Every structure is written in C-alpha cells, then in structure tokens.
Image: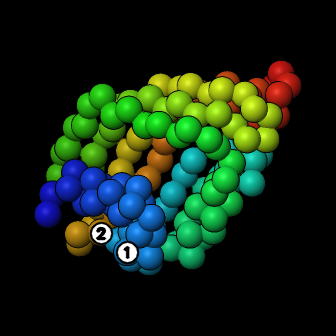
Amino acid sequence: MTATQIIQQFRQLMGAGQREAAFAMLTDDAYWHVDEIGAPWSGVFHGRAAIIEHFAKIDGTTRGFKRQIDRLFEEGDTVIEIGSLDCELVKTGEPFHTEYVSVYQTRDGMLSYYRIYEDSLKLYRAYFKEPA
C-alpha cells in the first residue's frame, strides 16, 4: 500500500465512524501536531493514546465540517496535502474557513506523523471570538 493509500484508508475509516480500526493504523509512537491556539484539542500529541484523546476532545466542537482536498503529492513515505477546511465552531457559532497544507509520514504501512499548517490566528479569533 502506498503512503497516499494509507492516508486515504485512515480518512475513510474515520469518516465511517470506524475509529478503532483507524487508530490501529497509527504507529505506537505516532506524532500528531495541530494548531496551538489553546483550545482543548490543540497541541502536539505523541503516541496512539494521546492522539485518541485529541480526537475525543475535538468531538462535538464543530458543525458542518468539510474538507476539500485539492492536491496530493507523494514522495516515498511522505505525503503533502493541499486543501481547505470549512466548519462552524459550536462554542461561538462562528464560521471558520482556512486553506491548509498537511504533511503525513508513514512507516511500515502505518501512519506515523501528521502536521497541519493553517491560519491559526483566524481559528483563534473564531474559537475565542476575540482578537488575538
């Protein structure tokens, strides 16, 4: 399975609510880095258990979440994804839109690394409904 196929399978399982199967695709020492705005889900997560906790904290925080993937680039075990995200933040009712770049890495047929680069200032303002 290619790195892109691993990422796609992980996403499909998550989208179908098959989280246990998706989380089984993470290496034990997986690294997950999302925004650092100070929200409950924010930060850097090391290991499968911490990543599962991250997803538990993000549950129910958005409505109408949509991800548009525009391009995928694969080089060996690394995948670069370019796209955009749209949702409404439940806490404030504010809409949020951002373009993003995500970097994934796989190892031995499993997902070992994820990092998203997005407009975190815009996310901060929408989540906390205040200027940064």
For image coordinates 57% across by 47% down, the residue present is 34
User: Which amino acid, by three-letter code, is at mark 2?
Assistant: Met
Where is residue 32 drawn, in percent x and y?
51, 57
Q: Judging from the image, what secondary structure is the residue with disc 2 in?
A: strand
Is any atom of residue 63 visible in this view?
Answer: yes
Q: What residue did someone put label 1 on?
A: 21
Report the side of 3 relative to 99 (left or right): left
Residue 15 occupies quadrant: bottom left
Q: What residue did someone put label 2 on?
A: 110
Of tags 1 and 2, which is closer to the observer? Answer: 1
Is any atom of residue 29 visible in this view?
Answer: no
User: Alpha-carbon distance for marks 1 and 2?
Assistant: 12 Å
Q: Crowdedness of circle 1 by 10 Å Cα count: few (<14), some, many (20+)?
A: few
Residue 69 occupies quadrant: top left
Where is residue 63 drawn, in percent x and y?
62, 41
Residue 128 occupies quadrant: top right
Where is residue 23 drawn, in percent x and y?
43, 72
For image coordinates 25% across by 37% down, the residue present is 72
Q: Crowdedness of circle 2 by 10 Å Cα count: few (<14), some, many (20+)?
A: many
Where is residue 7 drawn, in percent x and y?
30, 55
Report the side of 65 relative to 106 (left or right): right
Q: Which numbered disc, 1 or 2, marks the residue that appears first in the sequence?
A: 1
The furthest residue to the right? 130
Depicted 96 relative to depicted 2: above or below = above
The figure's colour scheme reads rainbow
User: Which amino acid, by three-letter code, is at mark 1?
Assistant: Ala
Q: Which circle marks residue 39 in the picture?
A: none
